[in-house]
Amino acid sequence: MSVLKQSSERLSTKKDVYELPFFKSLIRRSLNYLSAGYPVHYTGPPGIGKTTLAIHVAKRRKQPVTLITGNKDLTNNDLIGAYKGYSRKKLNDNFVRTVQKIEENVTEDWASGHLYEAVKHGHTVVYDEFTRSSPETNNLFLSVLEEKILPLYGSKSKDSHIRVHPDFRIIFTSNPAEYIGVYDTQDALMDRMISIPLNVLSVEAEVAIVMERANIKQNKAEAIVRFVRGVKETMDEKKGRLSLRASIMIADMAEKTNVCVDGKDKAFQNLCLDLTYFSVLSMIEDEEKAREIILNQCKKV
């Protein structure tokens, strides 16, 4: 019996993806690590569900959740906060009718950053795609994780730092280092987190994710997952960008445009070509060969 047929027996109805054994084990381990005070890091290709999983795990801690999205323009001011603008307060004193006293105070307004609020109040932070932020910015997290303090660099605050709340925890997510727009991460930061790769999912998990994300029936999800896996198996996967997102997009478009999930159907063939051709071509750099691989695997559905 094939792996896909076995998964069909276990997934007779649509169910919560996170109830699958693969994810239940992963979530349980992650919560244990977080409870023990260790940050967790999910790494894997785009479209595999890292952010959704991280938020799900964060919510399970029953603490407020703060989402920070990594990008090259993220600065210490964004994370810590800064004084922005001024407020003016004017007081008129007419205690004596013939004498008017006017007092005017001008103060700078403090705007707290997301990390500052999370550290101060014990939130669970999901730092999504943290490797898209510069290493200089991410250095701030070394003090948070190691010394349990948040330095208030350049904030003009009277205090040099604030203490990390004992309930504060953090979950990182990242794409592989070979992806565009990703910085090399300093070893000192990586050494302080528990990294869990999500680049390899079981067939059962992939089918369940496609069913949930595209709201598509199981037999259709299985056919699409089988097609994408078949394409990937014909080439060196490490060179390509064909991920679970391809399966989700094909399923979503098939459902929304009423395309029959059938390898003999011309509309389905075109859909598979449109949504996978560029990724396949980037792996083999041969236009005719790329079309041949995609159509051959499509016709097996």
Image (cartoon, helix red, strand yellow):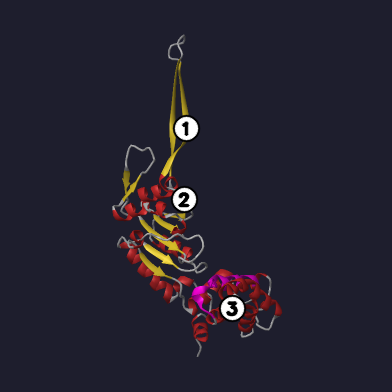
Query: Mark 3 against mark 2, which lies toward the viewer?
Result: 2
The label on residue 188 is none
Q: 220 or 68: nearer the eye?
A: 68
Residue occupied by mark 2: 74
Query: Is label 3 in contact with label 2 (beta carbons under 8 Å)?
Result: no
The label on residue 224 is 3
Name the amino acid, label 2: Leu
Query: Mark 2 against mark 1, which lies toward the viewer?
Result: 2
- Mark 2 crowd level (few <14, some 14–19, many ≥20, 10 Å Cα): some
Q: Position of residue 199 (x, y in %)?
A: 46, 72
How many angstroms separate mark 2 from mark 1 (CA)?
A: 23 Å
Q: Is residue 224 above or below residue 150?
A: below
SS at circle 2: loop
Magenta extent: 235-253
How many angstroms separate mark 3 from mark 2 (CA)?
A: 38 Å
Q: Tell me if residue 271 is in the magenta stretch.
A: no
- Mark 1 crowd level (few <14, some 14–19, many ≥20, 10 Å Cα): few
From the viewer's perspective, is 254 left or right of 192?
Answer: right
Name the amino acid, label 1: Tyr
Q: Position of residue 138 (x, y in %)?
A: 40, 54
Q: Mark 2 or mark 1, which has the lower sequence index?
A: 2
